[in-house]
């Protein structure tokens, strides 16, 4: 059971009476030639890593290798616990967890790329916040991960998930689309709703550039992961409410790729433009690599 486009995935779901996660599970067992039990073990290991990576920085923050981030997630967590969050518990947790994962990644900790290291906070941020808020079982979150994987696979095959090729819209944008689809499935939405949410998530972030300060996956990557989580929740909410996305997922993926290829080199992970090209960023870059001389 394989699919190369969103339309084919939806057709399989309709013909077989299956969810996206169920189709993806079958595909993975067939492609990898693993038994279902073996695949389950791997997925549970990935989930365990995700859970650890969202919690560790909240207990003991660690400064990143470049020194640009570290401790931000704990600040957000403390702010929420003091009852000061203006975003509400659900969104605040998703933002916090997404930023926490980036701190783990930037300090050489263990994370699960989803789809990349630079966008690894979005999917766990959304799904683990949902799990806590709605007391969801691990099995339900695993279904979300399979759905996220299906969307990520389609984007890798038909567009891009690389910032150097298509900007941050292809990294955080892709992660946000994956998380949006996963959230919809976890909360009982249909396959069509899942891809509607993913398409909307991509459309909201079209044109987002990749401009890491000092060429490090730290800033503005961390805050963009929190933004990707927020975008995913917004799009999932809209899809679950019955808001239909006018542009099909496959067409949106193609649009994202063409927009990304239109971005100048300076805005595709070169660390030469955007945030990375500002005076403040250049000064920090010199401090990191040039012994403090700007």
Image (cartoon, rainbow, N blue to C red):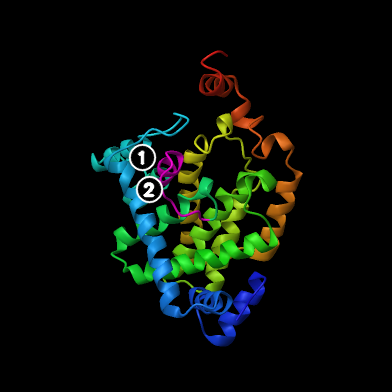
Q: Residue furthest top?
A: 293
The residue that mark 1 highlights is 73
Callout 2 environment at 10 Å: few (<14), some (14 to 19), or many (20+)? many
Q: Position of residue 260 (x, y in %)?
A: 70, 47
- In magenta, the rendered stretch is 101-114
Asked whether 94 falls inside the magenta stretch, the response is no
Q: The C terminus lies in which quarter of the figure? A: top right
Q: On the rendered structure, is 293 left or right of 63?
A: right
Asked whether 109 falls inside the magenta stretch, the response is yes
Residue 97, numbered label: 2
Image height of 216 relative to 235, above or below? above
Q: Position of residue 266 (x, y in %)?
A: 70, 34
Callout 1 environment at 10 Å: few (<14), some (14 to 19), or many (20+)? many
Q: Which secondary structure, mark 2?
A: helix
Q: Residue at x 37, y 50 (%)?
A: 53
Q: Earlier in the sequence, mark 1 or mark 2?
A: 1
Q: On the rendered structure, is 150 left or right of 167?
A: left
Q: Residue furthest bottom?
A: 16
Q: Residue at x 50, y 60 (%)?
A: 180
Real-space CA distance between mark 1 and mark 2, rounded to the nearest whole angstrom: 7 Å
The quadrant in which residue 37 appears is bottom left
Report if the CB atoms under discs 1 and 2 are less than 8 Å apart. Answer: yes
Viewer-proximal residue among 64 and 153: 64
């Amino acid at each position: 059971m394989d699919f190369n486009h969103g339309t084919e995935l939806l057709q399989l779901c309709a013909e077989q009476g299956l969810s996206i996660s169920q189709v993806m599970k079958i595909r993975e067992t067939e492609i990898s030639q693993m038994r279902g039990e073996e695949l389950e073990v791997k997925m549970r290991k990935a989930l365990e890593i995700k859970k650890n990576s969202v919690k560790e920085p909240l207990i003991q923050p660690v400064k990143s290798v470049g020194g640009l981030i570290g401790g931000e997630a704990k600040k957000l967590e403390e702010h929420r616990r003091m009852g000061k969050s203006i975003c509400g518990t659900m969104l605040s947790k998703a933002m916090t967890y997404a930023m926490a994962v980036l701190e783990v990644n930037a300090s050489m900790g263990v994370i699960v790329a989803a789809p990349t290291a630079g966008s690894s906070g979005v999917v766990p941020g959304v799904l683990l916040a949902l799990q806590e808020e709605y007391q969801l079982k691990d099995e339900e979150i695993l279904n979300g991960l399979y759905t996220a994987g299906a969307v990520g696979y389609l984007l890798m095959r038909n567009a891009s998930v690389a910032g150097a090729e298509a900007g941050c819209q292809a990294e955080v944008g892709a992660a946000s689309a994956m998380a949006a689809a996963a959230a919809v499935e976890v909360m009982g939405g249909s396959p069509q709703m899942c891809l509607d949410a993913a398409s909307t998530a991509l459309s909201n972030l079209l044109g987002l550039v990749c401009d890491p300060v000092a060429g490090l996956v730290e800033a503005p990557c961390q805050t963009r992961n929190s933004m990707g989580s927020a975008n995913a929740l917004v799009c999932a909410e809209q899809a679950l409410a019955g808001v239909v996305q006018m542009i099909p997922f496959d067409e949106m993926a193609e649009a994202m790729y063409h927009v990304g290829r239109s971005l100048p080199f300076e805005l595709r992970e070169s660390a030469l433009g955007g945030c990375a090209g500002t005076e403040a960023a250049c000064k920090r870059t010199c401090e990191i690599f040039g012994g403090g001389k700007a």
